[in-house]
Image (tube, rainbow, N blue to C red):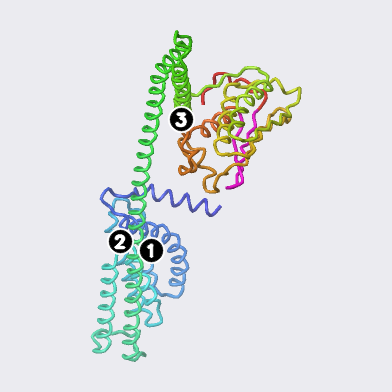
Amino acid sequence: MLKKLWSSYHQWYIEYSGFSKGTKQDDLSYFRDKLFISILILILPIGLISYIPSAIIGIILGKWFVFYVDTIAFFLICFLFFNNKMSLSLKKMIFSANLFLLSFALLLYVGLESSNGLLLFMLCVLVTLYSGKKAGIKTVVYSGFAYLLIAISFYFKLVDLTVFKDEVFEVIGIVFINNILFILMTVLSVSFLVDRLHNALLKENQLQEALIEKHKNVLIAKERAEQSDQLKSAFLANISHEIRTPMYGILGSAELLKDYEANNDKDFKEFVGIIEQNGSKLLDVISGILNISEIETGVMKINVTTFNIDETISTIYKLFSLEAELKGVKFVLKNNVSESLKFIKSDEAKITIVLKKLIENAIKFTSKGDVITLSIESNNSELNFSIKDTGIGVPKDKMETIFNPFYQVDITNKNALHGSGIGLSIAKAYVKLLGGNLSLISKEGEGSTFMFSITTHLENQQNQQI
């Protein structure tokens, strides 16, 4: 309740006084002005609470001087508080002079037992905070000068200071000097602290501005990199199309040449075979680049159909069995798909490509005597695939990077030099499109196992773009 009332009171006075940061005002000046406004907001209720009992006691005891001084000081504060036309700098001067005169009025009326020293100490600290180091030191100098005048007047009896009649001059001098030195030390300490805080704030602002600028530069660089990647992918997609068209013509012509009149010429047939074989390899590379481009630009599509996964797996197994046998690698198939899950709804072409890429990779990095095992398990509405080999394996620090486009684990390996380095990245992207995730378990020198799962019912995703 009190917090809510105080917040409302504070907000009301900020709006009433029209306080806001000036266009040419630095952060420190704004902080000092805001501090002074806060002092006014605090001192009015506190001053009222202090003034009422003080005025009543002054009237009862006949201490009219105290009553008049307190009344003038309090109403001057009220004047400063409610006057929203006066500049803050003038308000600061009047407020400081008010406390200064009140302090020495109490000293001259009450003597050394008054709260003069405490009031002066508070005044000098506040002046240092809301007006700066110079203003604080000036207040200390004015206080010292006032103390000096009082001491001289008392010593030479220039003025009747009955309040000090029982005091010794030396004691008065020591009290005055101690007050001034203590206040001066405090003012210098407070000003030093404010300067350090201000410098720290400036450095923080500079760092924030530098960080903001760096962040902007990073965003600009990121946008440029993304644009560059998009342009690169678009270029690769376009150039792949351009190259693939004449390649089909070359391969078609090679097919026709097989039935040419010179079909009994062994050299002729060998050359046609070379054209056909290498043309097919080149076409596969171009198709892979095109697929990567479509993946990166987000235009890759899937085509969901219902097909027999057993037939697909069997075709792939037969396709690579001969290649593995020629290399001396044993290729084992473990198909444990249940009868109820033989027909699935998915993208057959992409499943075929994923398996081909993973098996090709296994054959590439195995050698004579190694074993490759293709395992398929059915689990409710999922098919779990595993391609395990006993080849060279993948180093631990390369486990993630091998899925990056155009990356090859070991370019010093002669097998690694054959291939574009995009097979695994295509496989991973396709598996994700099919609702799964491709993972790898491997140990260098012992082999690798690639695993992925796909749903058997890929619903409502025909021709969906990624």
Nearer to us in this view, 197 or 206: 206
Question: Is 278 on the left-hand or right-hand side of 98?
Answer: right
Question: Is 371 on the left-hand or right-hand side of 415?
Answer: right
The alpha-carbon separation of the residues under discs 1 and 3 comes to 75 Å
The alpha-carbon separation of the residues under discs 3 and 2 comes to 66 Å
* Mark 3 residue type: Glu
Does label 1 or label 3 sit earlier along the sequence?
Answer: 1
Tag count: 3
Where residue 293 sits, quadrant-wise, is: top left
* Mark 1 residue type: Phe
In the orientation shown, which residue stands out farthest toward the right? 339
Mark nearest the camera among 3 and 2 is 3
Q: Position of residue 406 (x, y in %)?
A: 45, 36
Instruction: Name which residue lies at 44% across and 19% down.
Output: 267
On whether residue 335 falls in the magenta region, the answer is: no
Q: Position of residue 11 (x, y in %)?
A: 43, 49
Numbered label attached to residue 92: 2
Up the image or down, 399 lies above or below 382; here it is below
Q: Could you tell me which secondary element the residue under label 3 belongs to?
A: helix
Q: Is the residue marked by circle 1 packed among few (<14), some (14-19), or many (20+) residues within 10 Å?
A: some
Q: Position of residue 329 (x, y in %)?
A: 62, 35
Determine which residue is flagged by label 1. 74
Q: Could you tell me which secondary element the residue under label 1 belongs to?
A: helix
Does label 1 or label 2 sit earlier along the sequence?
Answer: 1
Magenta stretch, main secondary structure class: strand
**Residues in magenta, as a range:** 435-454
Determine which residue is flagged by label 3. 296
Up the image or down, 103 lies above or below 243; here it is below
